[in-house]
Image: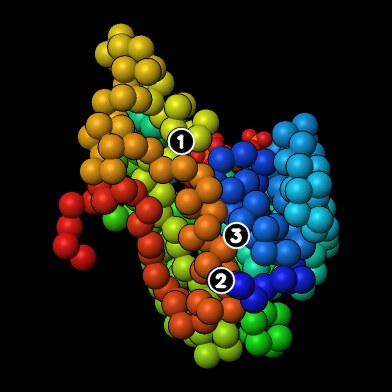
Amino acid sequence: MDLGIKGRCAIVCAASKGLGRACAEALAAEGVQLVLNARGSEALEATASDLRTRYRVEVLTVAGDVTTTAVQQALLAACPQPDILVNNAGGPPPGDFRNWGDEEWHAALQANMLTPIYLIKAVVDGMMARGFGRIVNITSAAVKAPIGVLGLSNGARAGLTGFVAGLARETVAHNVTINALLPGPFDTDRLNATLQGVVEKTGQSLEQVREARRNGNPARRFGQPQEFGAACAFLCSQHAGYITGQNILLDGGAFPGTL
Ligand code: NAP
């Protein structure tokens, strides 16, 4: 299927690795010009160079922490009229809420709620005026089924989800959609970092913990980042203008509910 977005311009945040990178790659494969971001410039430049070579699209980079105003402004300077925005940042650390104070909560809210909202605020009016916009927020399956030790993530991402639920109904008449993709366990560095906590607690090897997690999923495997990227590219396509305000789980069927 031709997604109909060749030549469009996308800002993809936190995109040197993992799910953000997979979204960038799926968009590049459709001929979308990219502005990519991550903090570490080495991996970011390697990703940008790989995508330029393989897909023959323009790829600009902005290295730095996307939760800072300076980096948000640099992204918008590199792509002043984006057609597509993929919001993403690292997830907050696990822990016990009794140990979290202002510092921990502000960091989680800044990364996983306020930064996406600030970037949406910066781009959404222009998208509506131009009559096309696709915004995808990478959140987490924890939005639908909270994970006890990830209270910072549960809280911050629920805040973003609630905000977007209102706005997404105001923009869609202008062909601007806002949706979220909710990853379950995808095989990325983040997943291994999360599972490392179980390794330390149980004394099992990382491979034993990974196997138990794979077997516990109805699909008997982890998701592959390319599968996530393909879903993102479809939501960004010209065909997806009637899908807005949705929170789409990609979890191999792990969430046990009927709806
Ligand atoms: P990942 O493989 O660790 O990749 C994270 C990417 O984000 C890297 O490119 C990293 O590069 C960049 N990044 C992190 N913090 C950043 C920041 N403040 N500013 C700019 N770039 C930043 O992680 P992932 O698995 O793709 O996860 C992406 C998101 O999905 C996270 O929020 C994660 O919590 C969530 N999630 C993932 C899973 C899963 O199973 N993978 C499940 C549920 C939710 P630098 O470190 O160089 O900045």
Q: Is residue 63 above or below residue 129?
A: above
The type of residue carrying mark 3 is: Val
55 relative position to 142: left or right: right
Q: CA distance from mark 1 to mark 3?
A: 20 Å
Q: Is residue 185 above or below residue 119?
A: above
The type of residue carrying mark 1 is: Asp
Q: CA distance from mark 2 to mark 1?
A: 26 Å
Identify the residue under disc 1: 187
Q: Residue at x 52, y 90 (%)?
A: 173
Residue 86 image label: 3
The type of residue carrying mark 2 is: Met
- Horizontal and vertical percent position of residue 89: 57, 46
Residue 36 image label: none
The number of callouts visible is 3
Please tell me which residue lies in front, 45 or 65: 45
- Horizontal and vertical percent position of residue 32: 72, 64
Q: Is residue 39 above or below residue 66?
A: above
Query: Which one is closest to the eye, mark 2 or mark 1?
Result: 2
Can you tell which quarter of the image residue 117 is in? bottom right
17 relative position to 45: left or right: left
Any part of residue 247 in sight: yes
Q: CA distance from mark 2 to mark 3?
A: 21 Å
Identify the residue under disc 2: 1
Whether residues under marks 2 and 1 lie with C-beta atoms below 8 angstroms apart, the answer is: no
Pick whichever of labels 1 and 3 is earlier in the sequence: 3
